[in-house]
Image (tube, grey):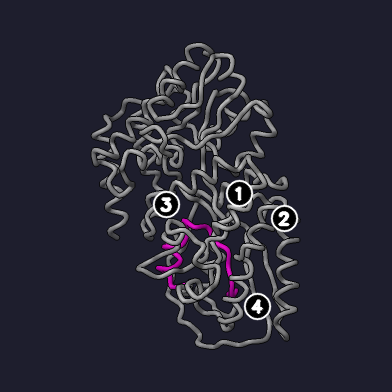
Amino acid sequence: MKKRIAGVALAAALLTGCAPSTNSPASSGADEKTGTLRVWLFDEPNRAPKEAVIKAAIDEFQAAHSGVTVDVQYIAVETRGERFKGAFNDPASAPDVVEFGNTDIAEYVAAGGLADVTADIDGWSEGADLGSDLRASVTVDGKLYGLPWWVGVRALYYRTDVFTELGLKPPATMAELTSTARTIREKKPELFGIAVGGKYTFGALPFVWANGGDITALNSAQSRAGVTAYTDLLKDDNCPPQQCADLTGGKTVELFAGGKAGMAILGNFNRAAVEAGAAKGKYAVVPLPGVQAGTVAPAFAGGNNLGIMKNTQRRTLAADFLKLLGSRTYQLKMYEAMGNLPTLTAARTELAASDPSLKPYLDTIAAGTKFVPVDPGWGAIDSQAVIPTMLQNIATGRATVDAATDEAAAAVSAALEK
């Protein structure tokens, strides 16, 4: 991963969550102040920059805590489910502090694996710097079970050369987005107006949220308006369904980076891929517009959290290390190393002043982000591809908007009620 640009591989941690069902471990009740503090962090394709930041944190922590050694293991994102399952069931092998994807939280809490850190965050001098939307993403039944460590959001990438050639301006509303996409497709048929995909859940959801809809009510009038706005882009006059109905978010990245689309809904974590492609030097980014001019469509707040295992025998040390890694100082260091956007407002404000390229993402966060249901049922909704199936059925004409959203709403309700 390049410095100040988050790598594409981070997207895996943004989009997936696979926590196991297991027996709930009991808290040990011990709180040792010396010994080895065990930490699990996610591995990266290029771990060295992250590892250097973590080493600095370890050195600082050990210097301030006599008799303490911090042991960090880097675990694969793809196999984290089995690793956490084993840790939940075997306290002797469990770490004390963990990094985990924010879509994993509900299932990990349901499994009884994570400690309540509400008092730790609320009593921390930097805890008040977390926005309400990010706090909500780690809240289950009114309690906080993690510290948001970094956040990733999507915005609208567009080809500046194409817009200049066609005399276009960045769209200010969702309606303008659609008309602009159709103009690009009409004038330059070798391009998709905006690259969209039937399997691109987090590209579609901002349309639902901007119209006042929600994942938990996909067949409401507001949600249907958003679903219609998105699936109207999966048509021959923009992104033909025979080519685009099966596209994932990753494929839309490839299309835009490869110079095959005039616009795309991509994340700050996709900048490295775009910079490595044909679109390098020929694009700009603005927040995805909302329904009304001057508004921003709510983006999904992906990212990773830091948490404490419920069965830790070093509860105080774990909390101290969590707060050190999650501090403004180390969030800024992680941005420099990996391109991870900070969750603390003060850190983002500092970055905004020094790196203008971050403005569209930071403006998107400031406008308010959204999250998936913090419920163990989200894993089933995601794994069963409820939202992609809905989008694809509409795009290919297999179902009307009303029928497809009714089916999806029923599946969501069934999963959340279990």
Is residue 381 magenta-colored? no
Asked if residue 100 lies in the magenta stretch, the reply is yes
The front one of 242 and 197 is: 197
Q: How many numbered marks are there?
A: 4
According to the image, label 3 marks what residue? 371
Three-letter residue code for mark 3: Phe
Say which residue label 4 marks.
37
Residue 2: give x, y in percent of width and height: 72, 45
Q: Earlier in the sequence, mark 1 or mark 3?
A: 1
Mark closer to the chain start, 1 or 4 = 1
In the image, taking residue 286 as reference, residue 397 lies left or right, namely: left
How packed mark 1 is, by other alpha carbons closer than 10 Å (few <14, some 14-19, many 20 or more), is many
Q: Secondary structure at mark 1?
A: helix
Q: Is 223 drawn above or below residue 98 in the view shown? A: above
Report how far apart the C-alphas of labels 3 and 4 lie in the structure. 31 Å
Residue at position x 36%, y 33% in the image: 292
Name the amino acid type tagged 2.
Arg
Question: In the rendered structure, which disc, 3 or 2, sits on the residue that comes first in sequence?
Answer: 2
Question: Which segment is the magenta one?
Answer: 94-113
Which part of the image, by quadrant, shows the C terminus? bottom left
Give the secondary structure at mark 4.
strand
**Mark closer to the observer (3, 2):** 3
Name the kind of residue labelled 1 in the image. Answer: Leu
The crowd level at tag 3 (other Cα within 10 Å; few <14, some 14-19, many 20+) is some
The residue located at (43%, 33%) in the rendering is: 198
Judged from this view, the residue extending furthest toward the top is: 187
Q: Earlier in the sequence, mark 2 or mark 1?
A: 1
- Name the residue beneath numbered marker 1: 10
Work out whether mark 2 precedes mark 4 in sequence or the reverse, and give the earlier one.
4
